[in-house]
């Protein structure tokens, strides 16, 4: 029987971070996964999708200059897989071993709360960290099991992208990949049940992305509920699946779209099945494993992080949780994980980045005391030099000038949002930006410009200034 200080189940973002953190404390660590290390992020998420988006942007740029250009879609997929392999080279069992981590590939099932079975062999850990991630959610649409649909887990294994594709789902995964594939010459139809894309973002940002995608040629069907799917041949007769037809209900009418392939990008489901959680006495539901604010499950020696625990299904949040859970498992003082300063990016072009609340969320919580500042990035000198078509920022502050939320629609918005994150995390007044020197010409100058507006408003809202103005 093998005994370890820390046993981590799942070698994705959260799991690898947990294992590396534990090894850094000098602990004997075992990392277990039924597949190769890297998880969803390396093999079917962050890494290959951003590689595909990168190639799509290149193709879009060339086509803008040379009408009729057609990307080599097989070469693109070869490149995507090469990037995956390059990233994986830093996550192999051999690389993990250099960090003091044992890796065991096999199916992990709890025998009880103290014993784990890996392909039947017993492993004992003083503490366990579950990081089994999530998988694509596939809705119970009539006929879905009769067609060879794709998800992000299978898309990047294609040798070549198809001529046409139906994308079901207008969330981050759906819109990122729909735009990228369209730019690579795939005829894309995107079906979304909600009336807008990226429904959790600022509405004007969602509408801007919708316009960009329509202008680029993506066929958007919004407010459309998928009802059935079937395989057809080109003559409309049932056949071996050369063409896939998706039938939807939109505004009370039946409409159909067809494509050579169907990709389902509706959402995610936590990987909780087949782990022996019931045998270990770990409370869970279809939404995931239940954890407290210290990331402990109902068994105090077992922790859970990442998508399997939620509430945020992002690789960077799995990393944050992995570090915190591991420290709590090792150190005598256990700290609560904080979700006060969560941020994320949707990697369309332009990118959408968000840190904190939207204006609607802020008004629901704080009423009309909030302060909202907006700026059009196309009016910056940098925007003018690049003939920027779309770019905006919205800053939501409390009445004192502290950041409640920032949303950015711009090229490299994911990098720009870092300044807002620093202000939020350090609990600084946005007026501090008024004195920050940004190089010219850059998009980051917008923070200084808004900071100066906030500084003036802070002065005008000061009680002494208000009293003086009233006395005049």
Image: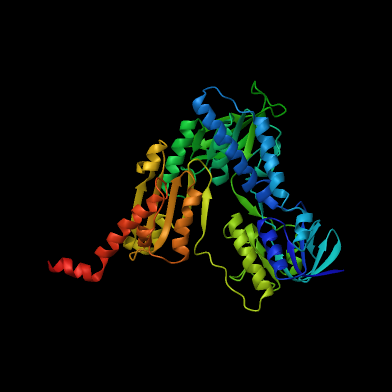
Instruction: Examine the rendered structure and indicate whether residue 243 appears above or below residue 6.
Output: above
Q: Quadrant of residue 296?
A: bottom right
Instruction: Examine the rendered structure and indicate whether residue 246 appears above or below residue 297.
Output: above
| Image coords of residue 14 (percent x, y) | 66, 59
Instruction: Examine the rendered structure and indicate whether residue 180 appears above or below residue 352.
Output: above
The single residue placed furthest to the top in the displayed view is 235
Which is more toward the observer, 341 or 147? 341
| Image coords of residue 135 (percent x, y) | 67, 50
**What colour scheme was applied to this rendering of the protein?**
rainbow
Image quarter in which the N terminus is found: bottom right
Say which residue appears at 46% left-offset and 40% top-offset.
209
Say which residue appears at 50% left-offset and 50% top-offset.
414
The single residue placed furthest to the left in the displayed view is 472
Say which residue appears at 76% left-offset and 53% top-offset.
92
Q: How many marks?
A: 0
Instruction: Examine the rendered structure and indicate whether residue 305 appears above or below residue 238.
Output: below
| Image coords of residue 292 (percent x, y) | 60, 70
Q: Quadrant of residue 108?
A: bottom right
Image quarter in which the C terminus is found: bottom left
Say which residue appears at 39% left-offset and 50% top-offset.
445
Q: Is residue 181 visible?
A: yes
Q: Is residue 297 visible?
A: no
Q: Quadrant of residue 49?
A: top right
| Image coords of residue 348 (percent x, y) | 52, 42
Which is more toward the observer, 105 or 447? 447
């Amino acid at each position: 029987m093998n005994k370890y200080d820390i046993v981590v189940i799942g070698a994705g973002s959260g799991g690898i971070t947990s294992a590396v953190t534990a090894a850094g404390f000098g602990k004997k660590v075992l990392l277990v996964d039924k597949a190769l290390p890297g998880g969803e992020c390396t093999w079917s998420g962050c890494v290959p999708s951003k590689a595909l988006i990168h190639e799509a942007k290149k193709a879009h740029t060339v086509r803008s200059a040379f009408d009729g250009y057609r990307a080599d879609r097989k070469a693109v997929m070869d490149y995507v897989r090469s990037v995956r392999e390059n990233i994986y080279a830093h996550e192999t069992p051999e690389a993990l071993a250099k960090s003091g981590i044992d890796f065991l590939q096999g199916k992990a099932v709890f025998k009880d709360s103290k014993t784990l079975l890996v392909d039947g062999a017993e492993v004992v850990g003083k503490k366990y960290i579950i990081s089994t991630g999530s998988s694509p959610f596939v809705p119970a649409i009539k006929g879905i099991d009769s067609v060879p649909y794709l998800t992000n887990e299978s898309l990047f294994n294609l040798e070549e992208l198809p001529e046409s594709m139906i994308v079901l789902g207008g969330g981050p995964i759906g819109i990122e990949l729909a735009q990228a594939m369209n730019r690579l010459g795939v005829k894309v139809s995107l079906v979304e049940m909600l009336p807008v894309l990226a429904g959790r973002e600022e509405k004007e940002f969602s509408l801007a992305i919708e316009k960009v995608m329509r202008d680029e040629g993506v066929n958007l069907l919004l407010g459309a509920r998928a009802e059935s799917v079937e395989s057809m041949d080109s003559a409309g007769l049932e056949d071996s699946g050369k063409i896939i037809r998706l039938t939807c209900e939109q505004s009370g009418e039946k409409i159909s779209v067809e494509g050579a392939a169907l990709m389902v990008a509706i959402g995610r489901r936590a990987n909780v099945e087949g782990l022996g959680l019931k045998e270990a006495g770990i409370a869970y539901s279809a939404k995931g494993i239940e954890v407290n604010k210290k990331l402990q499950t109902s068994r105090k020696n077992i922790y859970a992080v990442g998508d399997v625990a939620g509430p945020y299904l992002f690789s960077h949040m799995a990393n944050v949780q992995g570090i915190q859970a591991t420290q709590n498992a090792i150190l005598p003082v256990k700290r609560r994980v904080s979700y006060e300063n969560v941020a994320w990016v949707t990697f369309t072009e332009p990118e959408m980045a968000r840190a904190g609340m939207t204006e609607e969320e802020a008004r629901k919580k704080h009423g009309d005391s909030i302060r909202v500042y907006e700026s059009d990035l196309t009016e910056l000198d940098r925007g003018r030099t690049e003939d920027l078509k779309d770019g905006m920022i919205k800053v939501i502050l409390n009445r004192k000038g502290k950041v409640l939320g920032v949303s950015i629609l711009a090229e490299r918005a994911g990098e720009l949002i870092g300044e807002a994150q620093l202000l939020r995390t350090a609990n600084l007044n946005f007026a501090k930006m008024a004195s920050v020197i940004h190089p010219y010409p850059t998009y980051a100058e917008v923070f200084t410009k808004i900071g100066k507006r906030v500084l003036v408003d802070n002065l005008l809202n000061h009680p002494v200034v208000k009293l003086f103005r009233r006395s005049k």
